[in-house]
Image: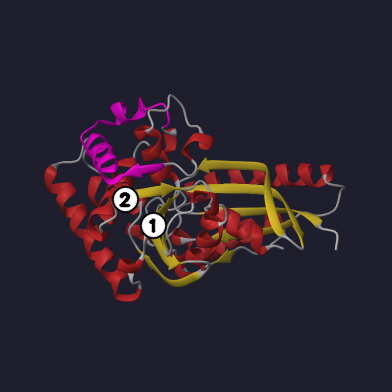
Amino acid sequence: MRGSVTRVAAIDCGTNSVRLLIADIATGEDGGTLTDVERRMEIVRLGEGVDRTGRLSPAALDRTFTAMRGYARLIERHGAEAGGGPVKTRVVATSATRDAANRSDFVDGVVEIFGVVPEVITGDEEAALSFTGATGDLARLRPARPYLVVDIGGGSTEFVLGSTSADAARSVDIGCVRMTERHFKDGDPPSPEQIADAVGDIDTALAQVRETVPVDEARTLVGLAGSVTTVAGIVLGLPEYDSSRIHLSRITGTQVHEVTRRLLHATRAERAEFGVMHPGRVDVIGAGALILDRIMREYGFGAVVVSEHDILDGLAWSLV
C-alpha cells in the first residue's frame, strides 16, 4: 500500500503563549512521520489577570487575535503551496480559557479568524495530547519506561504517566504565570518569604498529583514547554535559543536547582541578559524553573529529558 501525505495545522492557545505547527504527516504500512513546515510561538499572555478576575481582558484578547491572524495567513499560504486544498486545522485552548467567565469572547474570535470552533480541552485531554507529542521520537534515546511527562504551562501543569499511551494523568493549577502573579508580582527579585510561599503552593499541588498518578513508578522524567526548554538552554550555555540543541537534551537535578537559584536571585534586567531568554518569558521564568525544581526534588528524579515536541505534535497527529 502506498503512503499518503496530509498537511495539517495545529494551534495551541495557552495562558502565556499561542503556538502554531504546520506539518506534513506521511502515513503508510510502516507507521508515520511528522515533518515541520512551520513552527511558531508568540507570547500573548492571554491569561494575564485571570487568576484574580476570572475573566480574559480585552487587551489580552486583542494580543491573542493579532497573533492568530498572522497564523491564519501562514496556513492559507502553505495550503496553497500544498496544492490549494484546505489545510486540516485544529485549535485548542487550555488553562486560562477553561477558567474564564467570558470564554465565549475568545471562541467567537477564533471562529472568525480560522473558521473552526476552538476546543476548550480539559486538563486530562491536554495531558494525553502532550504525551503523544512528547514521546513520539524518544525511542532513539532508549530511556527506561514508564515515562512521567510534565508539561509546565502558564496557568497549569499537566502530569501524565505511561509507556506507549497515557495510563494516568492529572492537571493542577500551578503554572509560571499563575505562580508569578500569586507570589512574585511585587518582588524583583522575589524575597525569601515569597519564594517559600510559592514552594508551599507548588508542593501542595504535587501532593494532589500523587493521589491519582503513581509517580513513583516512573523511570524517566520528560519535561515540556518554554520554562523547561529555557532552563535547559541556560544549563547548556547556549548564546541563543537553539531547538536542535535543546531537544532531547538531558539535564540533571543539580543543574536545574542551580539555574533556578540564579533565576530567583536575579533582577528582571539580569534575567533578560540570558541569550536563550524570550522577552515574553523574562517575568515568569523564575516561577517556571521553581516548578520544575520542586517536581524533581519531590518525586526524586536525578535528571530530566527535555522535549521540544509537545501538545502541538499530539494535535497534528490527531488530525490524521
Q: Position of residue 283 (x, y in %)?
A: 34, 39
Q: Secondary structure at mark 1?
A: strand
Name the quadrant containing residue 277: top left
Q: Which residue is mark 2?
A: 292
Q: Which mark is residue 220?
A: 1
Q: Label 2: how many residues lie within 10 Å, few (<14), some (14-19) or many (20+)?
A: many
- Can residue 294 be seen at all in this image of the molecule? yes
Q: Position of residue 220 (x, y in %)?
A: 39, 57
Q: Position of residue 186 (x, y in %)?
A: 22, 42
**Residue range (magenta):** 250-276
Q: Which mark is residue 172?
A: none
Name the quadrant containing residue 312: bottom right
Query: What colour scheme has been applied to the protein in the rendered image?
Result: secondary structure
Looking at numbered disc 1 in the image, what kind of residue is underneath it? Thr
Considering depth in this image, is 1 or 158 the residue closer to the camera?
A: 1
Q: Is residue 72 left or right of residue 268?
A: right
Q: Quadrant of the N terminus?
A: bottom right
Name the quadrant containing residue 178: bottom left
Looking at numbered disc 2 in the image, what kind of residue is underneath it? Leu
Q: Is residue 4 above or below residue 59?
A: below
The residue under the point 71% across, 42% down is 74
Q: Is residue 15 above or below residue 208?
A: above
Closer to the eye: label 2 or 1 = 1
